[in-house]
Image (tube, grey):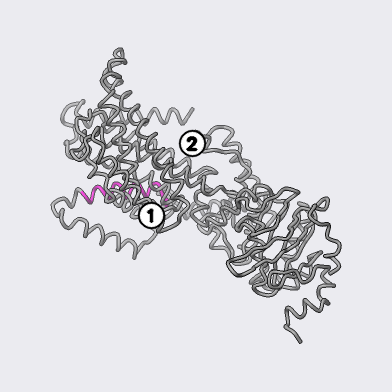
Amino acid sequence: MRGLLVGLAITGVLILTNAAFTGAFGSGVAMPPYLLQVICLAGINITLAVSLNLINGFTGQFSLGHAGFMAIGAYASAYFTVTFGDRMRAAFGVLPPFARDGAVLLVGLAIGAFLAAIAGFLVGVPSLRLRGDYLAIVTLGFGEIIRVLILNIDAVGGARGFGGIPKLANFFWIYLFAGVTILVVHRIVHSSFGRTLVAIREDEIAAEAMGVHTTRAKVISFIVSSALAGVAGGLFAHYLMYIHTNSFTFLRSFEIIIMIVIGGLGSISGSILGAVLFITLTEGLRQFAQYRMVLFSLMLILIMIVRPQGILGHKEFVTFLTRRRRQLGTDQGTAAEGG
Amino acid sequence: MTAEATRSGPVPAPGATLDLSKVTMRFGGLVAVNALDLQIARGQLYGLIGPNGAGKTTVFNVITGVYTPTSGSIRFEGEEIAGERCGRITRRGVARTFQNIRLFGNMTVLENVKVAFDCRQATTLTTAVFRTPAHRAEEARVDADSRELLRIFKLDHVAGERARNLPYGSQRRLEIARAMATSPRLLLLDEPAAGMNPHEANELMDLIRWIRDRYGMAVLLVEHNMKVVMGICETVHVLDYGSTIAIGRPAEIQRDPRVIEAYLGGA
C-alpha cells in the first residue's frame, strides 16, 4: 500500500516535471530542446546500464550483445506503432489523446520487450554455458547477427533506416521506465534469487554445489536483462522517431559497458551515475568529437588503474556514504542479540 | 579384506545412505578410480584416506555430480544419482565442502549461508519482484534460520563481515556451516583440517562429532591429518591408485601391512 502511494507520487512528479519541461507552465520554466533531449537520452541510458548490470555486474556473465536486444525492442515496437498504431488509436476513440498515445506506446513496448526476451532466451541458452571471454565473444557475435538480420528486413526500412515513427515517448515515459527498471533490478538483487546470482558471480562451482541451478538462473537473469533493453530500445525509437541499424552496432554495447564499468559493476546507483556521467561527457566533449573516444579510453584506463572496481565498486550510493556507521550499527545489533 | 567379504552385492543394505558399486572414473588413459565399492550407513562417520593422487577428490566429484562416472552405479538412499547435475544431487541431500576453500568471497558470512538455504525455498522471480507476503515471510524465515546456524558454528559475531576477510579457520567453519544449510543427510568434507593448527583441528573434531550426533547424518571425510581421521571415523577406507586396499576400523587400518606399504613404500 505504501509502495503504491510512493509509486503514484513519483508518477505525479514525473508528469508535472514533464509538463514544466515542455513549457506547459509558461516558457520561462521550459527546458531548451537540446538539453531536454540530452536528459531524455540519459534516462534511456540509465535503463540500458541498469539492465546490463544485472547480467554483467550481479551475475558476473560478461555479455557484449546488449545493443542487439535494444535493436529488437526498438524495431519491434516501432513496427507495431507504425503499422497498427492508428487502428488502435481509433479503437480507443473514447479516451483522451494522451491516454490513447500512452496505450499504443505501452503495447508497443510490451511487444518489443517480449521479443527481446525471446531473443535473450535463444541467445542465452547456448551461450551461457560458456564462461568469461568466450561468452563475451559469442554475445558480441549474436548482437551483430541481430543487427545484420534487421538490416536485411525491408519491411522495417533495411539500410534506409526506419522513419515515420510517432513521437510517443517523452520525459515522463522514459523516466517512468527508468524507475521501473531500477525497481525491478533492485528487488531481484535483494531477493533470494538475487543472492543466487551473486553467488554464481563469486564462484559458479560452489553455487552449483549449494543446490543452485546455475544455468537456469543465468538464463533467467539474461532474459530479464534483454527484456529491459528491449524497453529501452522502444523508448529510443519513439523518442527520436527514426532508427537505423547504425545506432545498434557493437559500439553501442561497448558504451553501455563503459557506463557500468565506470560506475561500478554490481552497483545499481553506480550504473545510474555511469550513464549520466557518460552522456554528460559525450555531450560536453562534442566540440572535440574526433578525440572523444581517445579521452574515453584514457579515462577507462585511468579508472582501471586507480579504482578497478569502478567509482562505487560493489556498493550502493547510500551504503557508500554510510558504510562506517552501518558497520558499527550491525556490530552493536549482534552483540545485543548475543547477550 | 574382511570388510570386502561382508559386502552385500549390488542391492543396497537396509539403511545405507550411500552405496557405490563398481564405480570407475577414467580420464583418457588414466584410471583415477577403479571399480570402487563403498557403502556408508546412516549416521556413520566414514573416513577416506590414501596417498596423494589416490583418487579421493575424484571420488568426491563423482558422488556430487561434478563428474559422471565412466561406469558403475551410485545410489543415494536407494536412488541412482550417477550422472545427475550437481545442484540436483545437493537438493536430494548431499552437501560438500571443498579442498581449496570456495566461499562466495564478496558476500557476507550471513549471505553465504542464505544462498545454501535458498535451495529449499520456493521463491521465484515474480514473487521477488512483487514482494508478495509469502516471499517476505520466507525471507524472514531464511534470515532467522541462517542466524541460528551461524550461532551454532560460532560465526554470529562476524555475520556482516565479507567472507574473504575471515581468518582461515573461520572460513573452513563457514564452509561446513554453508554445507549444513542445505540440510544434507550426507555430508562430504574434503580435507577440512588442512592448514589448521592442532588446537583448531581438535575443535574441528568436536564440531564434526557434534553435528553428526545432532543432525544424525552420515559424514564422508577425506583428510590427511591422521589424528583427525583416526580420532573420529568409525570406518576408514584406504585408496591407492584408485583402488581399495583396505577397509576397517581405525585400529585395524593402522596395523594393516598394505596400508603401511602404500604410505611408506615397499620395505
Q: Secondary structure at mark 1?
A: helix
Q: CA distance from mark 2 to mark 1?
A: 28 Å
Mark 2 or mark 1: which is in front?
Answer: 1
For residue B53, above or below residue A235 = below
Residue on which the image places disc 1: A136
Label 1 crowd (10 A; few <14 / some 14-19 / many >=20): some
Pick the front one: A150 or B156 = A150
Q: In the rendered structure, which amino acid carries the disc numbered 1?
A: Ala
The picture places residue A250, in percent across and down from the top left corner, at 29, 50
- What x and y, as percent, mark residue B147? 64, 49
Q: Where does residue B233 sit, x and y in percent of width and height?
A: 79, 65
Foreground pick, A298 / B15: B15
Q: Is residue A11 above or below residue A232?
A: above
Q: Which residues are magenta?
A: A266-282
> Do badges 2 and 1 share one subunit?
no
Q: What residue is shown at x 23% (from left), y 35% (from top)?
A: A154
Q: Any magenta on residue A324?
A: no
Q: Is A276 positioned to the left or the right of B46 in the image?
A: left
Q: Secondary structure at mark 2?
A: helix
Given the image, what chain letter belongs to the residue carrying mark 2? B
Residue projecting furthest to the top? A94
For residue A224, side relative to residue B191 (left or right): left
- Residue B129: which disc? 2
At 64% from the left and 68% from the top, the residue drawn is B31
